[in-house]
Amino acid sequence: MFRQLFSAAATAIALAVAAQGAPAAKPPASHAANPRVSMVIEKRGTVVLELFPKDAPKTVAHFLDLVNKKFYDRVLFHRVVSKFVVQAGDPKSKSVNGALLADIPDTEVGPRFGLGAGGSGKTVPLEANRPHLHGTLGLARSMDPNSGDSQFFINLNDNHPLDYKYCVFGRVVKGMDVVDKIRQGDRIQSIRVLTGSKARK
């Protein structure tokens, strides 16, 4: 009996030692990192955004498709509301002099320059599964909940009145200090998928 117990204990110790020396197992493929994009804003700096394909698969796929088509290059931040949001994504803004937007209220941008309603022409259904926390990336839309397209906003504060009414599909992981410096009329130089980041569709 004692010999059997000793043998079993020795075997257990040997297995434990072998396990300590074994290389760590790789995480399952399902835990792959979320895709990230780099947004360069002229005269301000670079912002890195992490996207949430699990929570907003159609929105993220649509956004990445536009990024890969260089849709956002030269687009303006046509709406900036202090302590609320900065908003961009209207392709009509590419032909507008951003300096003309700098010193006017955001409510006058639409009437004076025809900005705020433009898009790619393809909409996605509402995927409102996350709260609007400081630094999160949201999809702008009209009164129709399923009208979101190319226009996006970054929350400058926790904006809980927007929770589950607008889609959150990403967050700022680097460069929130740059976001805080954005002014109405600032121009996006480019948005690109970061190397090694999977552009999931």
Image: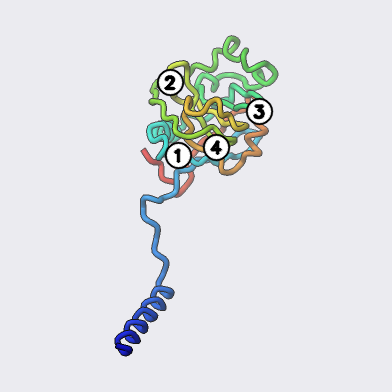
Q: Amino acid at mark 4?
A: Met
Percent across and percent down for residue 74 are 54, 28
Q: Amino acid at mark 3?
A: Lys
- CA gap, disc 3 to disc 4? 21 Å
- Identified at 66% across, 16% down, the residue is 105
Kindly identify which residue carries mark 1. 52
Give the SS element for disc 3: loop
Q: Nearer the viewer, mark 4 or mark 2?
A: 2
Quarter where residue 144 is shown: top left
Percent across and percent down for residue 107 are 62, 14
- Identified at 36% across, 79% down, the residue is 12
> The N terminus is located in which quarter?
bottom left
Kindly identify which residue carries mark 3. 83
Q: Residues within 10 Å of mark 3 (few under 14, many from 20)?
A: few
Most foreground residue, 16 or 199:
16
Left or right of 117 on screen, residue 96 = right
Q: Are marks 4 and 1 in contact (CB under 8 Å)?
A: no
Q: Which is more N-terminal, label 1 or label 4?
A: 4
> The C terminus is located in which quarter?
top left
- CA gap, disc 4 to disc 2? 26 Å
Give the SS element for disc 4: strand
Percent across and percent down for residue 143 are 46, 16
Kindly identify which residue carries mark 2. 145
